Structures are given as C-alpha cells and as structure tokens.
Amino acid sequence: MSENGNAYSERYTLNLGPQHPSTHGVLRIVADFDGETCISADPVIGYLHRGMEKLLESRTYPQGLPYTDRLDYLAGVNNNLPLALAVEKLLGVEIPERASLLRMLTCEIMRLASYMVGIGIYIMDLGAVSGVFYPFQQREYALEVMSALCGARMTQGYIRFGGVQADWNDEAEAALDVLYKELPPFIEMYHKLIDENEIFLRRTKGVGVITAERAKSYALTGPNLRASGVDYDLRRDAPYCLYDRFTIKVPVQQAGDCHARYAQRMLEVEEILKLIKAIHAALKETEPGKIMGAVPKMLRPPAGEAYAQTENPKGIMGCLVASDGKGVNPLRVHFRRPSFDNIAIFSELMPGHKVADLIAIIASFDIVLGEIDG
Amino acid sequence: MFGKGILKGLAQTGKQVVSKRLTEKYPEEKPHLPERWRGNTFALEKDKCISCGLCAMSCPNKVIRQKFDKDEDGKKICTEFVMERQYCLFCGLCVEACPKGCLHLTHDFETAVYSAADVPQDLLADNHLDAAISKYGEKPPLVKPVIPPKPAAAAPAAAKPAAEDAKGGEA
C-alpha cells in the first residue's frame, strides 16, 4: 500500500526540466511522485548562471549598466533602475524631473510588456496555445515604443546614471498612441476568451493556494503576493522616482490560488495603462531637453554602501552597491532578484498536487530564469 | 451549462480569424525601423575621427580593437579599427562616447555570414557608410548661448589704441 492509499502506484523521482518548454527556461524541478501525486519537489537552479554580480564588479559603473538588462530580460529597463538609484544615492546627484518621468514611463511600459508575456505563457502552458498570441501582439506594441525611443526592443539599457539616454520623440509618441488604441479592446477580448473557460477554471481554482501568512513568511513579492491578499506595492508604499505624485490603485485578490494570480495580473494591466496615461500627461508638461543631471564623466562614488529597491514586474528588485571611494569599479554589487525569492515556496507548495498542477503552479508564478540564476 | 465559457472563447477566436492580418511578410516586405533603431553593424566617418580611443575605453566587452601610430606631422592616427562583433552587446555606449559623433550604428540586421572570420568588422577597410545610419546616440544640436553685448566693451577697445598712441608719442 502506498502513502496515498493507492495500492497500484509506485514511488518514483521525476526530473521536470531543465529542458522543458513549460519551465520558462532552464528551471529544473526534481520531484518525487506517488502515482500522479507529488510527494516532494525541489527546484534546482543555476543552469543560466552568468555571474552577473561579479561581471559588474569587474567593469566600471556605466559599463555595468547594459548587463543588468539581461537579468529579467522581459523587462530590461526595470532592472537598470535599482542599480541606477543605488549609485545615484552614493553620488548624491539630483535627477531632472523629465528624466525621472521618462524612467517611470518606460518602466511602466515594460511592466506591461512583461505582464503580457506572463499571462500569455501561463495560458499556453495550460494547453491553450492560441491564447499566447494575443498578449504577444500587445507586447509588440509596447516594445515598438521602446524601440522608437532608444533603439532596442528588449535589452534597452535606456537608463543612465543621472538621467536617461535619450529624450522622448515623435516616433515614440506615435507608437504609444497605437498602444493606447489597441490595449483596451484586447483586455475586453481576453476576458471573454479566458475568464469563463471551464478547462482553465478547473485547472487553476484551488490549485497552489498560498495564504497571506505563508506568502509573507516566504518573502513573496509582486503580483504573487498581492494575489494572496497582502496589499503591498512599493510604488505606493515606499515611492521612488516621482511615484508619490500619482495615485496608484493596487488591486488585491484574496484567494491566493493559481487563478487569483492570473486575475491579479489582468487587473493590474488596467491600472498600469491608467498610470502610463497619467505619467505621459505629466511628461508633456515638462520642458524637453533636460534629461541628464550633473554627473561627472568618470564616476568615482565616495566610499560607502547604498541600497535601492523598486517594484519590478516580478516583485521587489533590490540592488546593493558598495564603493571603496577610490576605484572606478564597484567594490561589491548584489541584486535581490524577485523570481529567485518567489520560487522558494515551490517545495512547500507543490507536494499534494498532481503532475499537471505543477505546470500550472510554475506558470502562475511568472518566473524568469535569467533573474533566478543571475 | 458546461462548455458555455469555451464556446464564448471560441467566438472570440472566430472574430480573430476574420480580422486584419498582422503578420509582416518578411523578407518580401522589409520591417519599418525607427530612426534610433540599433542595428548590428557599425559605420565610421574616418576623416572626422580624431583617434582618441574613447569608444574602446567605454566598451564593456572590449569589442573594439584599435592600434595607434603617429604620422609624419606627429599627429596621432589610427592604424587598426576592428569591431569584434561576436562579443558585442549592442549597448551603444561607444557611439555615445564618441566626442566627434563619427561612430554610428546602422539599420543593418541581416548580418548572417558563412564564416566566423567575417563577423569582425574592419572599419578602416570598409567604413560601411553606405548602410542606413541609425540616429542612435545623436546629440541634440548645441544651443548657442546668447551673450548680451557688454556696454563697457567699447570703452577699453577705444582706450587701447589711445594708449599705444601715447607710447608711440613717447618713443
């Protein structure tokens, strides 16, 4: 007789990944199963490790910036921001208003793009392959804005210490207008496509439930935390840049299951669009041209440590920079990568679920392996 | 009714079938590239280059291989300028670092070659200026500061020749 009372099942170990399309890259999960039921699961990481922190320590401050795009490669600009904020804290420079607004605007656009991938891939992992193409089209509109603004679609490297790389232009304005036009009908259409789908509901409702207490104790952040009923968003609760100027409505879901994590992202997309419009309106009122603060060409921040954190699409991204005050390289750089902290709960969450539910749980967390492995 | 939601979703899929097709017919139709779009090759305006080496210094990955020499006038010249594109991140820091604005990224993206030896780009042999040049890193034109004319400027100018005259008179 086996542990789950099934006389005909046998205990075995299954390797899920690292070469598996639904592990979002190269996540490997070594899971023990009794028949179809998971007994224990252990995430194994490191297949995409590039030594990002060490790379940054061996390069000058500005040279390190383009590398941070490769952490969470679905939202490049958002990763530049914590490093830039930390170094600027050390330097003590003031950022022009327009540069701050441009940083926020690009971060929100890339947050939207990242959510689109998160939602689309989630639906695809659950078997609805056509469901991935509609959000990807919207993501393409968001990436068009970035490519008109700074020349690259994904690894933008748009933020500079002291400001941003380029000013807003007409092409980006036109691309953003397309996004404004296309996104609301898409949201409406996608709700109709997915929300009442019985297969989707049965595969996600009540699967992978995380209570608010467990979510907090495992340091979950971002939409995964808010889907468990914890009302916490850094943009509102500990504002950086100029987020304190804008009213940010943070949607919260109470269920904490896989379906809540999908619904949470869909609700947040609407709020992001509102925020983009508000920031865009504020940007229009500032004077063009002032996008860089007074920063020396050769950066040698004074000795000390600085920590800055931002609300990234996957959760709270933090960056610690230590400088010895002499060299042009940072002494130490460390990133708090949200996906890395989010997957810690997998070993507790997965036991008791079926094989197919494991896929739903992984997909609902919207992880990026570039960020986990660092 | 079980399956109502699936049918509702299917109706949306049906609408998409008859909607406008979004796919670009590459390679028959070339994609539209924005002005600042960063391509995969570089272009160099050789006569504007002052051989300062700032581009190579700003590169995070040591992509730019340069050698310098002096010509007969003692002026520093560049004898080798190779972009080892196999290591390139296309971050554009070199283009931004150029004080003369003579290094550019281009709009080329179809850069597949048969041999790995063809990937590095010797910019002195072929400056690649025939490609569509990206406007990435282009600095906005400097606004000339308007200096208000000094009212006192005329007085010293007038006083100077007078002093010279006085000197001449003494001699």
Image: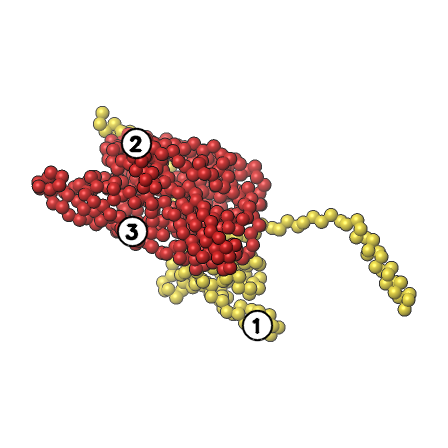
Subunit ID for the residue under disc 3: A
Do the residues at pointers 3 and 1 share their chain? no
Report which colour depicts chain B: yellow
Residue A145 percent coordinates (x, y): 46, 43
Q: Which mark is residue A255?
A: 2
Instruction: From the image, tell me which residue sits under label 1.
Output: B70
In the rendered image, the quadrant that contains the C terminus of chain B is: bottom right
Residue B137 percent coordinates (x, y): 52, 52
Please identify the quarter of the rendering in which residue A53 is found.
bottom left
Is A219 or A30 nearer to us in this picture?
A219
User: Rounded to the nearest whole Å, what is the CA distance between mark 2 and mark 3?
Assistant: 29 Å
User: Rounded to the nearest whole Å, what is the CA distance between mark 1 and mark 2?
Assistant: 73 Å
Element under disc 2: loop
Residue at 19%, 48% (x, y): give it: A14
In the rendered image, the quadrant that contains the N terminus of chain B is: top left
Element under disc 3: loop
Instruction: From the image, tell me which residue sits under label 3.
Output: A45
Residue A298 percent coordinates (x, y): 54, 57
Is A10 or A363 nearer to us in this picture?
A10
Do the residues at pointers 2 and 3 share their chain? yes
The chain displayed red equals A
Say what amino acid the circle numbered 3 marks: Ile
